[in-house]
Image (cartoon, helix red, strand yellow):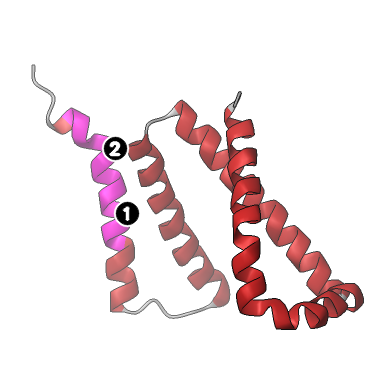
Amino acid sequence: LGSVGNQLCITSILGFLLSIPFVLWKEGGKLGQFVESFKTIPALRNNMIASALWFYGYNELSTMTLKKTNAVTQSVANTAKRVIVIVGVALVLGESLDFMKLLGCGIGIGGVFLYSIIDNLVKKD
């Protein structure tokens, strides 16, 4: 299969091809309406293309990161990213951070911090 990028590309294409029958089965009756909307509504077209490119880029970067690190490190970094996004969006949009949101973010940040220092805590002299 070659490089990690090739592996991601092949699995993405296979996933797309395997999903086509299910999409046609569940949503096939709306395909004409979707195609017409895609042709006539620039915002829909632009947002779908941008979303697809961002999603593919994110998965490409994630796969490359996984090759250079181990699965646990990548998982912890992904958790940290989610916490940062939740807090950042709440601050930008002016949403309230109620107790449950703060508790969840605190657990996430605490877990990432603990993971980063655990080797020093359990190091044997």
Main secondary structure of the magenta stretch: helix
* Viewer-side residue, 58 vs 89: 58
Above or below: residue 80 compared with residue 43: above
* Viewport quadrant of the C terminus: top left
Q: Which residue is mark 2?
A: 116
Residue extending farthest right:
40
Above or below: residue 15 compared with residue 120: below
Image point (46%, 34%), residue name: 66
How far apart, in angstroms, are the residues tagged by discs 2 and 1?
11 Å
* Viewport quadrant of the N terminus: top right
Above or below: residue 60 compared with residue 19: above
Residue 118 on image: x %, y %: 20, 35
Q: Which residue is mark 1?
A: 109
Q: Which residues are magenta?
A: 106-120
Residue 44 on image: x %, y %: 79, 73
Q: Report the side of 16 relative to 49 (left or right).
A: left
Q: Report the side of 102 relative to 63 (left or right).
A: left
Q: Is residue 119 magenta?
A: yes
Above or below: residue 118 compared with residue 104: above
Image point (61%, 47%), residue name: 14
* Viewer-side residue, 57 vs 88: 57
